[in-house]
Image: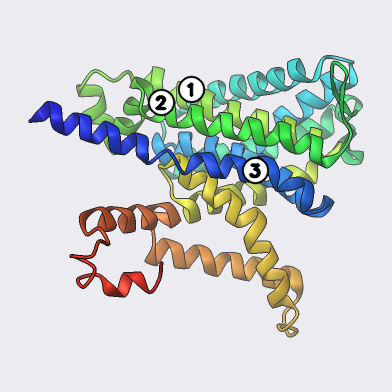
């Protein structure tokens, strides 16, 4: 019986992956027909998606609060820009940017062995201001207040001089980041991260090395941030200190809350919602709200949406979808049982 149940669960798991095929087809076919502006938005969406998945590994899965993720995005971006201007191959510069941020994350993760909660959040937030000061101090290499121009990326004979060409690179790395994140979550380190999130004392009693796995979570999460920073520079062709303000760290946290912390798919959904769909809706609403400044209205609406999700839907969009999916599995919509859940059919 146990073997039969295991085979059934494996079969259901495989069936649940079939939806990925049409999603990948849409990602590959649709962009050439939606215009330059929307492709640029998709590029930004992919960058934030990678950064949010990294933050989810660190905060959502391992439970280490970070308010300074934009600092590690900045390190990756400036490392990539500096190496790209030195005529280093883009793929090498991108990996080097990720490793640079990963090393910084490892260093920041060392104090996390002693502190947690609010104190860790303040420590990581301080990293943003330290990074900004370093950017200004080394202005000879970073451009300081003027920012840094990044050359067009070339991969052999392929020159990424259009948003569409950059999109296929960014989207490919986004999918790769999600796949690796899912693999990591269900691997031994991922389970150790979850134990630490639940209870550090219980994790240590059960043989989980807190120094190893906490620093590993910081290193992996910040590697994602560094890759996202490099891709941001590649996509925009220019980076400045204003691209990595503390508000960007808060934006990444909001994406995580809305999508669903602790879930790789949730982090991706939150990044897509906050980068692509929500700003479009805000722009349409702004036309009818004339008594509030546009920039103030955007911050106000972001705050309201975050509060609504924290109070009413703390598990995020993906968490709610999981509940609905499990309900539909328990009560499938066939001819015999449709009377019990007739109200669901109206919404399908």
**In terms of secondary structure, where does tag 3 sit?**
helix
Q: Quadrant of residue 328?
A: bottom left
Disc 1 marks which residue? 110
Does residue 334 lie above or below 264 as drawn? below
Q: Is residue 69 left or right of residue 20?
A: right
Find residue 14 and report its horizontal and vertical position in percent: 36, 34
Lower position in the chain sequence, tag 3 or tag 1: 3
Question: Which residue occupies the foreground of this view, 177 or 9?
Answer: 9
Identify the secondary structure beneath mark 1. loop
Disc number placed over residue 99 in the picture, else none:
none
Q: State the mark number for residue 113.
A: 2
Q: Residues within 10 Å of mark 2 (few under 14, many from 20)?
A: some
Q: Position of residue 249 (x, y in %)?
A: 61, 46
Looking at the image, which residue is at 43% across and 26% down? 183
Element at label 2: helix
User: Visible in this render: residue 253?
Assistant: yes
Q: Do the CB atoms of the residues marked 2 and 1 lie less than 8 Å apart?
A: yes
Foreground disc of the pair 3, 2: 3
Q: As drawn, is 40 to the left or to the right of 195?
A: right
Q: Residue at x 21, y 29 (%)?
A: 7
Q: Quadrant of the C terminus?
A: bottom left
Residue to which mark 3 is pinned: 27
Colouring rule applied to residues: rainbow
Of 202 and 236, the residue lying toward us = 236
Report x, y in % for residue 180.
50, 27
Quadrant the N terminus occupies: top left
Question: Would you place residue 290 above or below residue 70 in this image?
Answer: below
């Amino acid at each position: 019986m146990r073997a039969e149940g295991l085979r059934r669960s494996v079969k259901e798991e495989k069936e649940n992956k079939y939806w990925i095929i049409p999603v990948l087809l849409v990602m590959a076919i649709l962009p050439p027909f939606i215009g330059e502006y929307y492709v640029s938005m998709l590029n930004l969406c992919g960058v934030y998606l990678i950064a949010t998945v990294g933050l989810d590994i660190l905060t959502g899965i391992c439970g280490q609060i970070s308010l300074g993720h934009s600092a590690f995005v900045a390190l990756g971006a400036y490392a990539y820009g500096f190496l790209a201007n030195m005529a280093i191959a883009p793929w090498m510069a991108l990996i080097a940017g990720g490793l640079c941020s990963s090393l910084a994350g490892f260093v920041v993760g060392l104090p996390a062995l002693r502190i947690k909660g609010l104190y860790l959040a303040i420590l990581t937030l301080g990293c943003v201001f330290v990074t900004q000061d370093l950017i200004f101090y080394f202005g000879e290499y970073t451009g300081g207040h003027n920012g840094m121009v990044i050359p067009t990326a070339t991969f052999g004979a392929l020159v990424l001089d259009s948003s569409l060409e950059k999109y296929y690179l960014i989207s490919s790395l986004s999918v790769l980041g999600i796949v690796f994140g899912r693999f990591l979550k269900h691997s031994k380190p991922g389970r150790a991260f979850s134990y630490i999130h639940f209870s550090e004392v219980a994790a240590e009693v059960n043989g989980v090395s807190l120094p190893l796995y906490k620093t590993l979570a910081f290193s992996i999460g910040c590697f994602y941030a560094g890759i996202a920073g490099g891709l941001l520079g590649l996509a925009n062709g220019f980076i400045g200190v204003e691209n990595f303000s503390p508000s960007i760290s808060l934006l990444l946290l909001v994406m995580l809350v809305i999508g669903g912390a602790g879930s790789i798919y949730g982090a991706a959904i939150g990044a897509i919602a906050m980068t692509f769909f929500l700003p479009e809706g805000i722009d349409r609403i702004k036309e009818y709200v004339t008594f509030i400044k546009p920039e103030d209205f955007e911050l106000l609406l972001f705050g309201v949406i975050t509060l609504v999700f924290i109070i009413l839907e703390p598990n995020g969009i993906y968490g709610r979808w999981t509940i609905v999916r499990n309900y539909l599995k328990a009560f499938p919509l066939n001819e015999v049982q449709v009377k019990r859940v007739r109200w669901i059919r109206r919404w399908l």
